[in-house]
Amino acid sequence: MNVRAAIYSHLSGYAGLTALVSKRIYPGVLPQNCPYPAVNFFLVSSDPVEVMGGPSGMDIPYVQVSVRDTTIDGAAAVADQVKAAMRSTWGAWGSATVHYSGLRNEHDLYEPETGTFHIALDFEITIEE
């Protein structure tokens, strides 16, 4: 299982988040005409963990999870659920094992073309596949 599949499995199984966005959680770009609120995420970078000069089977990916909604309050409510999901549950995310997941940055944006509020959440994860 790759990191994208692990994150998708974890987020789509978190009841507090799916209560707000249903199944609108996407790796990569949102589908055209996607209803809001919605969540998508991108792998920003990934650093392999080396042990004694060789691969350890662990990586430290940096992931941006983006929340979009038509109101800032709606986006903030979804962002709170994403943060709760990503920070509180370590262990099995699908068939991968997460040893750490922490929020590194959060910023609010507004997208005038779509009239949506966008909250970008940057996470650092330590994952073993």
Image (tube, helix red, strand yellow):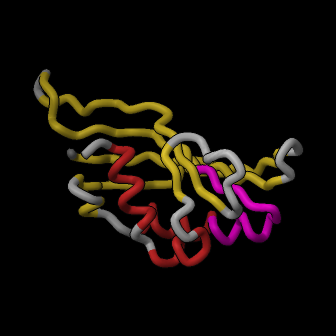
Who is closer to the viewer here, 50 or 75? 75
Residue ranking furthest to the front: 33
124 on left or right of 20 = left
- Taking the image as drawn, is residue 83 in sight? no
Magenta range: 66-78
Count of marks overlaid on the render: 0
Question: Residue 21 in magenta?
Answer: no
The picture places residue 91, in percent across and down from the top left corner, at: 25, 63
Work out whether residue 96 or residue 55 is closer to the camera in this orientation and state it: 96
Where does residue 24 sit, x and y in percent of width and height?
Answer: 56, 61
In the rendered image, the vertical position of residue 82 relative to residue 5, given as above or below: below
Q: Residue at x 88, y 45 (%)?
A: 112
Rendered residue at 38%/32% (across/down)? 46
The quadrant where residue 95 appears: bottom left
Occupied quadrant, residue 71: bottom right
Residue 93 percent location from the top left of the image: 29, 59
Return the residue found at the far top.
Answer: 53
Does residue 55 appear to the left or right of 21 in the view shown?
left
Quadrant placement of the C terminus:
top left
Q: Is residue 71 magenta?
A: yes
Q: Does residue 104 appear to the left or right of 126 in the view shown?
A: right
**Residue 49 appears in which quarter of the rendering?**
top left
Q: Residue 94, position in %: x, y?
A: 27, 59
User: Residue at left 16%, top 29%?
Assistant: 55
Which residue is pictured at 35% across the width and 49% down the height?
5
Residue 92 seen by the camera? yes
